[in-house]
Image (cartoon, helix red, strand yellow):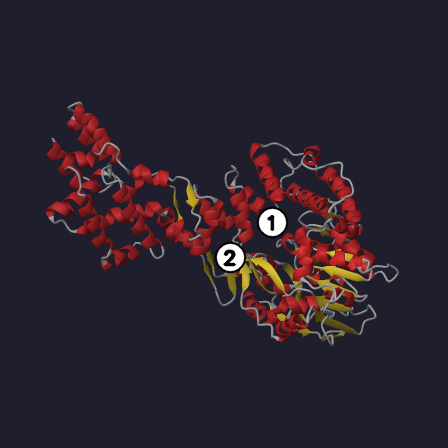
Amino acid sequence: MKFMMLSLLRTGFKGNTFCACRKILIDRQNNDFVRACHILSQIRRNFSSNVVLGCISSRKSGKIEDITVKETIINTLVDPTGTGRDLTGDLDQDQVSQTLMSFTKQSEVYKAAQMEGLIEPFLSKAMERFTEFVMNNISQLPAQLHIVLYDIINSGKHMDDLFPFFIDYAKKLYPHFEFKDDLQLICDLTQPANWYPEARRMKRKIIFHSGPTNSGKTYHALKAFMNADTGVYCGPLRLLAVEVFKKCQDYDVPCDLITGEERRFHFSPDEPAAHISSTVEMASTTLEYDVAVIDEIQMLRDQERGGAWTRVLLGLCAREIHLCGEEAAVNLVQRIVHTTGDSLEVRRYDRLTKLRFDTKAIETLEEVQGGDCLVCFQKKTIYNVCMELERLGHNVAVIYGSLPPATKLAQAEKFNDPKDPCKVLVATDAIGMGINLKIKRMVFLQIKKFSRNENGQLVSSDISTPQAKQIAGRAGRYGAGQEVGLVTAFTEKRMLELKDIIKQEVEDIKAAGLLPTVEQLEQFYFYLPSFKLPDILNIFEHMSTVNNDMYFLCAMQNFKALASLIDHIDLPLRVRYQFCMAPVSLNSPSLSTMYAKFARSYSNGTPIDCKWLLMQTDYPWVLPRTIKSLSNLEEVYEIMDMYLWLSFRFEDIFCDREKVQEVQSELETVVQEGVKKLGLLLLKKKTDETKGLSQKKFKWKKKGK
């Protein structure tokens, strides 16, 4: 009986025998060997088929080869009944180890695996994991694998017989290799222009308005936009979209405003205006326009958002498209337009006012003058600078990223108003685009900025040449009575460093960003239904093919981080994709927590109204008395922005949009009043950290004072 079973296992099938042999042992006890053979013939299948697709988990290393099935799924391969051991006896652990070592060193094994489509870095990792699996489960191996190892050690059988077991294990470890050809076809990104057949059927004329800040390039593009019968403006920021919307109103051009968080209609939602001002992500690629404007076209190089600019450049259905941006983008646009069959005209502009470095750097804040804008890249630095300037008698305006849009505009108006006592502005690089400011002199207090690298770690580095030039170019605005804009820095050393940065030539942009569409990810999910979105994105990135001469796949670090935050929540893939596109700052624990709550509510089908939302805050709000309370209110505003953004996509769950808009407007007023009293709030903030920062990091005062 034992010999017959061993013979069957050696020759009868080449698959996993875990379930089969368990049934054989049961039937052997019932003296029903005929039935056992019948079962054996029925379950003849491949080694890998025993494991159903299970949950996929990404390991902490972030390496693509570490995205594998969970250990619990791998462990279903073992045979706890020890059928193989029962048939042949125990395997010698040292001999098995030597056999596996010899197997892994054979070059023929690697060549054969590569022919099966298993390539590095997956091949080496699979070999390592296969060895671990065998050694850790040497007494519970699948029966046929046990027998093959026994025969290799004791009967001189060739170790190549291990290869089918290894390759099946590897494909089980990385299930996406089973559908490699189909998946590679899905993530073929070499012809993105063909994603937009409607645009390809049109004969589009592209006009590139190239020039530095304050050169009038956007003015000429907007003139064409407002003179057209129909048009769309695509801006990088909500502030810019609102500015164009208001400008259309000033010129009696009916225009609708469409951003992620806001809709304003000139007539009504049922009667759209002929002109639309929108953020670039919200622009439609199916509606037809006479004229489209894509502002800050150089943003197509951005690692996170670049795909949005590439999308509208390739996909807008407009007979005439005006691009506004840096000269560095011209050559790339020329190459892209060549693939789309459109025509291109480049119009170059010079700066309308002069821009030069001041004769010297400033050494203390006592040298600050009216019309100065002091630039730094950390909010706490802004607070400390403001506190010292208030002490010196300056009335200060502040602009930084987390302020509500209306508050930024109010602070800008305060600084621009010649009748207002405020003559000094302290800001982050948020002023680089989107706000018109009457700055006489740009003072760089810092030239280093923190950003996250591809591993999500915060690193400090000098601002780039394009960033430095764009910020510096805000000085000496044309039409503000300023013929020359001045640029300086804090300390002579920093001034020299800034000059080195700005004098460098801006390199031509080599490639434009691409983002995977939700349809592409859905097709991936069809083949790999148990993979989670972060891992699908990583696999998509690894398997994708891109025309590297013109395009790159965006890093999508923020998207992936948001996907990980709601990884444990049951959501359809398309819904999960939409949630991951939401404007959520990962720097705020409260925002991240509320984001997960929103996703959970959608999963449970529980509508969220304004009352519930206010219960999560300190409503009713009062004027902030500390910097911390002001920051808390800014976060509440961002939470409401997130709610409004989701309400335009999932109205059944985020069902109280109008009420939330009303209370958000109230909150905006409270924040504005708090920012007006920023000096008083800062005087109450007397921590050791602040003292150390102002005394050590910046020498605001002259020596001896």
Q: Nearer the viewer, mark 2 or mark 1?
A: 1
Determine whether label 2 and label 1 are within 8 Å by CB.
no
Identify the image quadrant of the N terminus: top left
What percent of the width, then of the height, locates residue 582?
61, 47
Please report whichever mark, 2 or 1, sits nearer to the chain's N-terminal start: 2
What percent of the width, then of the height, locates residue 381?
68, 57
CA gap, disc 2 and disc 1:
16 Å
Other-residue count near label 2 (Cα within 10 Å), few / some / many at <14 / 14–19 / ≥20? few
- Residue nearest the viewer, comparing 516 with 255: 516
Q: Is residue 212 above or below residue 674?
A: below
- Residue nearest the viewer, comparing 74 with 305: 74
Task: Please tell me whether mark 2 sits on a helix, a strand or a loop.
Answer: loop
> Could you say which quadrant of the image residue 328 lies in?
bottom right
What percent of the width, then of the height, locates residue 37?
18, 31
- Residue nearest the viewer, comparing 597 with 686: 686
Q: Residue at x 11, y 35 (%)?
A: 3
What percent of the width, then of the height, locates residue 532?
46, 44
**Numbered disc total:** 2
> Could you say which quadrant of the image residue 400 lies in?
bottom right
- Kindly identify which numbered label has been placed on residue 587: 1
Q: Is residue 359 above or below residue 401?
A: below
Tell me if 604 is positioned left or right of 673 in this view: left
Other-residue count near label 1 (Cα within 10 Å), few / some / many at <14 / 14–19 / ≥20? few
- Kindly identify which numbered label has been placed on residue 454: 2
Identify the image quadrant of the C terminus: bottom right
- Residue sticking out furthest to the right: 419
Q: Amino acid type of disc 2?
A: Glu
